Image (cartoon, grey):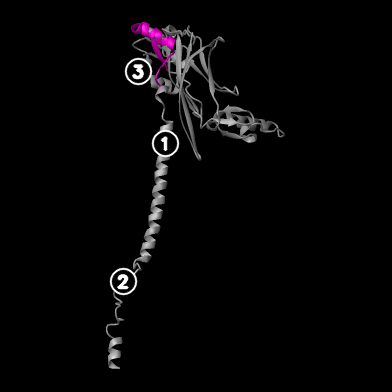
Amino acid sequence: MNSDNNGASGGGNIKGFDFDDETPGINQSGKSGGASGVKKIFKIIFVSILVAVWAFILLTIYLRSNDDILETPILSDEARAVYNADKDNFIMYRIYTQEFMTGDGSLQLSTAVYAESAHEFEIGVRIAWTQLRYCEECDALYTPEQLEKQLREDSKNADKNESYEPSACMTKHNLVRASLEDRELYYTLTDSEGNVYPMVNRENRTKSINFFILNLKYEYERISFSGLYFDIENNIINRTLESSPNESSLDILSADELSADGLSADELSAEGASDNVSSGISYYLNIYDKQGGNLLFSACVYNNYIYINRT
């Protein structure tokens, strides 16, 4: 009896087994291990989301950054031949257009040049296809600015007539991003006297991505037109410098300052230009939806009141 009692109370151990030892096959940190696993899963998810967000931001920055073609004069083969034949006497001007984009920024103009020696005008165009909209019912492209104008017209007509039926595409039709459609633009160069000038060169580059909900497309073009004779002699800059070279405030204004907001014809004339010389012939770049024929943007790219600088 005594020996049995002693065996039962001998340190609380069963023969061959020690309660102080870890239970075989059982992880004593089971609870904390489970919590740690959940934390790791959330950490992986968080890091993955963070990487995806940064990748999206960097990709968007890349796609929206301008391609070099937008700002680098190329000119046609004929113009380059004139340049190579007499490089020292090849004359080219940088043209600082006062109108350089639509109000919504979907179409932007850049780095216009006039090769006087070859009578050729060239300009860069940036197209944000992601911002342009395609109307399925009209089978036409529109800029956001044009769609907003349609809404304003609807509002005015509705105020005048209670029974007026809205006609704006944003109200009645199905609009999708133009980047999802296979569309193309075409260009014309016309002047205030009704002349149309032929396009002689067109170069383009495209940056795009179409992945799940991410759809971005930007196109960069340089287009050239020939047969132009700009009246450089009567340009406001030349007239001003000839009339008052030491007093003209244009001497201290940079090209960027003049072209950023654009001085009006009256303001430029007040700077010392001769009153008996008008703006001369005005030249317009017109951008159309090629398939639908809809005019998307038109801008005056040169007249005698637009700033120039010989390159």
Question: How much space separates mark 1 and mark 2, taking CA atoms?
Answer: 54 Å
> Closer to the camera: disc 3 or disc 1?
1
**Label 1 near label 3: C-beta < 8 Å?**
no
Mark 3 vs 1, N-terminal side: 1
Q: Residues within 10 Å of mark 1 (few under 14, many from 20)?
A: some
Question: How much space separates mark 3 and mark 2, taking CA atoms?
Answer: 87 Å
Q: Which residue is mark 1?
A: 59
Residue 8: horizontal and vertical position, in percent? 31, 86
Mark 1 vs 2, N-terminal side: 2
Look at label 2 and name its amino acid.
Glu
Up the image or down, 146 lies above or below 32; here it is above
Magenta-drawn segment: 71-95
Mark 3 vs 2, N-terminal side: 2
Q: Secondary structure at mark 2?
A: loop
Q: Which residue is mark 2?
A: 22
Q: Which residue is mark 3?
A: 252
- Left or right: residue 99 compared with residue 1: right
